């Protein structure tokens, strides 16, 4: 809306971003999300980025209350005078390519606060349901002045772990009906948790959920540096949110003391670049697959003349892997 | 001869292809004021999502300032305002006025939907509204109108 980033020098861009200019921050995030754009203005952002903001990921199934919890957490952190950023991801439809971004509606109370920046993002087919713009958005919000940034995952369920690589602290949000101990033994979300928020804790069944998590943690053979905290919350009333915020702070202090804070920032930059390369290569590959000889192999598989395993080997053999040069 | 079942369209449209696609149009959908009738905005939001738009749903009870702030933070191309309370003659000019105050009215398409009497169309248009949809409008009419308006007003064209 109305700003041409290319008319700004790097110095001016960073100065305005540091000064809390929301339209500039917003435009930069849009640029980062759009792979077809010229990304030159982002050079200044990446050079300026120090990694001071605490990045907290909230993951868990849809409808469990992640957005409503973030709404409460914004309130808790604003009381401490922190500047708060939120990146809320919702899924892009693979059919229509549209998306209904409905997380923000739970946080509208904080929209007019000049020290809160909330941005919705459609997954847009990003690697592991993390849209391409997330990495840059974190950096933009950091320079903008956010002390803490909440990243809300798509709520896809068990394998909704990709956002974990972008954050310092992982909060897994579950509900009272989260399932039995077998669910907790499965690989995925639960292995990444630093904190469990058992939301909707006004439901008596939530106590069972707490016990199931405790049991699962006890039987785990993976020795965790930080024994995950379990916090009961009621996002609609705000109960337990103070304790959740304390646990988030405790985890931050823990990783800072271990010198892991900066390390996470470095890991994040590496995985961001890896994701970006993989996403770009896969997109380019889609073009390559239209090759006639490759389509022939597809047909042979369809006609049951070959397994997908053999076909895959043959296709890879046919692909010119020097695609970077095209 | 074996018959071949055709798979859902999904098969020919790889998920990853989306990253290379052209930027989708972003639409903010909000209800200003104290009107609580949200069936219409939900139907339209859903329909626009299914038509390939990215819809940010801001829900009920938004003040004009909240709508402008949200539009800025989400960097939207279109603002869709649903109103059935009869307060459109006050609330809509307050929103377009606030957009103008921030220098944004020229760069965003403003649409109003709801129970708007014909005699109020002129007032809303003069305040900066680009399109008005009254009961009976279909989703496809709205989708076509949005595509035309973003092209004409802010120069975004979908391939």
Image: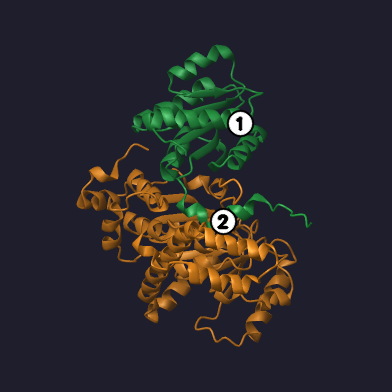
Chain colours: A orange, B green
Q: Residue A72 carries which label?
A: none
- Decide if residue A200 is on the left or right side of residue B146: right
Badge nearest the viewer, 2 or 1:
2
- The percent coordinates of residue A130 (x first, y second) are 50, 60
- Decide if residue B104 is on the left or right side of residue B109: left
Q: Is residue A323 above or below residue A219?
A: above
- The percent coordinates of residue A309 (x first, y second) are 61, 74
Please state which of residues A72 and A89 is positioned toward the viewer in this rendering. Answer: A89
Which residue lies under the disc numbered 1?
B140
Q: Mark 2 lies on which chain?
A: B
Q: Which residue is drawn at 60% across and 38% down?
A: B45
Q: Residue at x 39, y 32 (%)?
A: B154
Residue B109: image quadrant is: top left
Which quarter of the image is occupied by the N terminus of chain A?
Answer: top left
Which quarter of the image is occupied by the C terminus of chain A?
Answer: bottom left
Q: What element carries label 1?
A: helix
- The percent coordinates of residue B104 (x first, y second) are 37, 33
Which residue lies under the disc numbered 2?
B14
Q: If you read the primary sequence from the N terminus, does the residue marked by circle 2 or circle 1 appear first?
A: 2
Q: Which chain carries label 1?
A: B
Q: Is residue B105 above or below residue B121?
A: below
Q: Would you call the spot at circle 2 few (<14 residues within 10 Å), some (14-19), or many (20 or more)?
A: some
Please state which of residues A18 and A154 is positioned toward the viewer in this rendering. Answer: A154
Q: Is residue A245 above or below residue B52?
A: below
């Amino acid at each position: 809306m109305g700003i041409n980033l290319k008319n700004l020098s790097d110095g001016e861009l960073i100065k305005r971003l540091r000064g809390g200019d929301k339209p500039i921050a917003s435009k930069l995030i849009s640029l980062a999300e759009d792979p077809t754009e010229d990304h030159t203005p982002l050079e200044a952002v990446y050079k300026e980025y120090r990694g001071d903001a605490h990045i907290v990921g909230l993951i868990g199934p849809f409808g469990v209350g992640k957005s409503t919890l973030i709404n409460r957490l914004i309130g808790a952190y604003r009381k401490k005078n922190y500047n708060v950023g939120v990146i809320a991801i919702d899924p892009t439809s693979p059919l229509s390519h549209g998306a209904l971004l409905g997380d923000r509606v739970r946080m509208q109370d904080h929209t007019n606060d000049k020290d809160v920046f909330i941005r919705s993002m459609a997954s847009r087919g990003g690697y592991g349901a993390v849209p391409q713009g997330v990495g840059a958005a974190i950096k933009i919000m950091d320079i903008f002045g956010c002390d803490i940034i909440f990243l809300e995952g798509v709520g896809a369920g068990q394998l909704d772990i990709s956002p974990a690589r972008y954050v310092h602290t992982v909060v897994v949000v579950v509900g009272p009906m989260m399932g039995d101990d077998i669910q907790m033994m499965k690989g995925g979300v639960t292995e990444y948790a630093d904190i469990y928020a058992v939301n909707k804790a006004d439901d008596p069944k939530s106590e069972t959920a707490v016990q199931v998590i405790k049991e699962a943690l006890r039987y785990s053979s993976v020795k965790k540096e930080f024994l995950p905290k379990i916090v009961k919350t009621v996002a609609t009333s705000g109960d337990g949110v103070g304790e959740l915020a304390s646990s988030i702070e405790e985890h931050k202090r823990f990783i800072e003391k271990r010198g892991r804070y900066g390390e996470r920032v470095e890991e994040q930059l590496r995985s961001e670049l890896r994701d970006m390369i993989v996403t770009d290569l896969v997109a380019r590959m889609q073009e390559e697959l239209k090759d006639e000889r490759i389509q022939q192999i597809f047909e042979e598989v369809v006609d049951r003349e070959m397994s997908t395993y053999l076909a895959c080997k043959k296709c890879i053999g046919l692909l010119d892997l020097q695609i970077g040069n095209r | 001869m074996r018959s071949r079942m055709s798979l859902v369209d999904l098969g020919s449209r790889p998920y990853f292809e989306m990253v290379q696609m052209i930027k989708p149009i972003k639409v903010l959908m909000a209800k200003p004021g104290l009107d609580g009738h949200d069936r219409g905005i939900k139907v339209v939001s859903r329909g626009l999502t299914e038509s390939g738009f990215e819809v940010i749903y801001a829900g009920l009870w938004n003040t004009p300032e909240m709508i402008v702030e949200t539009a800025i933070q989400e960097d939207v191309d279109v603002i869709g305002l649903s109103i059935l309370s009869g307060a459109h003659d006050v609330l809509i000019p307050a929103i377009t006025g606030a957009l103008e105050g921030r220098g944004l009215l020229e760069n965003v398409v403003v649409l109003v939907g709801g129970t708007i009497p014909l005699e109020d169309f002129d007032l809303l248009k003069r305040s900066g509204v680009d399109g008005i949809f009254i009961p009976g409008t279909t989703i496809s009419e709205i989708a076509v109108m949005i595509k035309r308006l973003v092209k004409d007003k802010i120069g975004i064209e979908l391939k």
